Image (cartoon, rainbow, N blue to C red):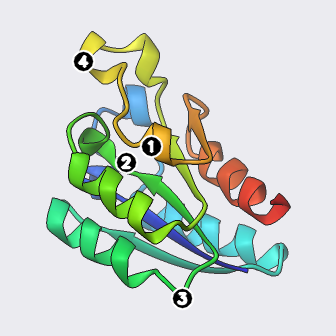
Amino acid sequence: MKILVINGPNLNMLGTREPEKYGSMTFSDLEKELYEFAFKLDATLETYQSNVEGEIINKIQEALGKFDGIVINAGGYTHTSVAIRDAISAVSIPTVEVHITNIYSREEFRHESLIAPVCIGQIAGLGVNGYKLAIRALLDL
């Protein structure tokens, strides 16, 4: 199975950005850990990060016919991007939404996900382990 992991804005700042919320693991360390995890499960993984909404949309569209599943942490775009939601819907690739923090225990504006309704599931608040759970969920489909 080929899985695309997409990370949105500010996730490249892991390890330095609000470590009390996001932990001390760097983005590079996260990618390495996910590649090792996927390898053990005989899955092929590609990771992608962008702070630019349009680039994320392009990557989702490019996944059509190339990937069997998507794991997405859209960061702040989770709550604002109808365009990312529409891209996920358009490609019809099983997608799991992930958040390192529990978005429902944070500011009220973070409580609504525009992309959740077009995803097969959502994992929030379990730290970077949420990515692994999402990968496993896609493999179990």
Quadrant of the snapshot with the C terminus: bottom right
Q: Of circles 4 and 3, which is in front?
A: 3
Residue at 36% x, 15% y: name it.
106
Q: In this picture, is 88 found above or below 114?
A: below
Q: Amino acid at mark 1?
A: Ser
- Judged from the image, the secondary structure of the residue bearing numbered disc 2 is loop
Give whichever of 78, 23 is nearer the camera: 78
User: Could one spot residue 52 in this view of the protein?
Assistant: no
Q: In whole angstroms, how far apart are the C-alphas of marks 2 and 1?
A: 4 Å
Residue at the image position 69 percent from the left and 60 percent from the top = 135
Q: Which residue is mark 2?
A: 15
- Pick whichever of labels 2 and 3 is earlier in the sequence: 2
- Determine the residue positioned at 32% across, 40% down: 78
Residue on which disc 1 sits: 24
Residues under numbered marks 4 and 3 in contact, where contact means CB atoms less than 8 Å apart: no
* Residue designated by label 3: 66
Q: Nearer the viewer, mark 1 or mark 4?
A: 4
Given contact means CB atoms under 8 Å apart, are the residues at marks 2 and 1 in contact? yes
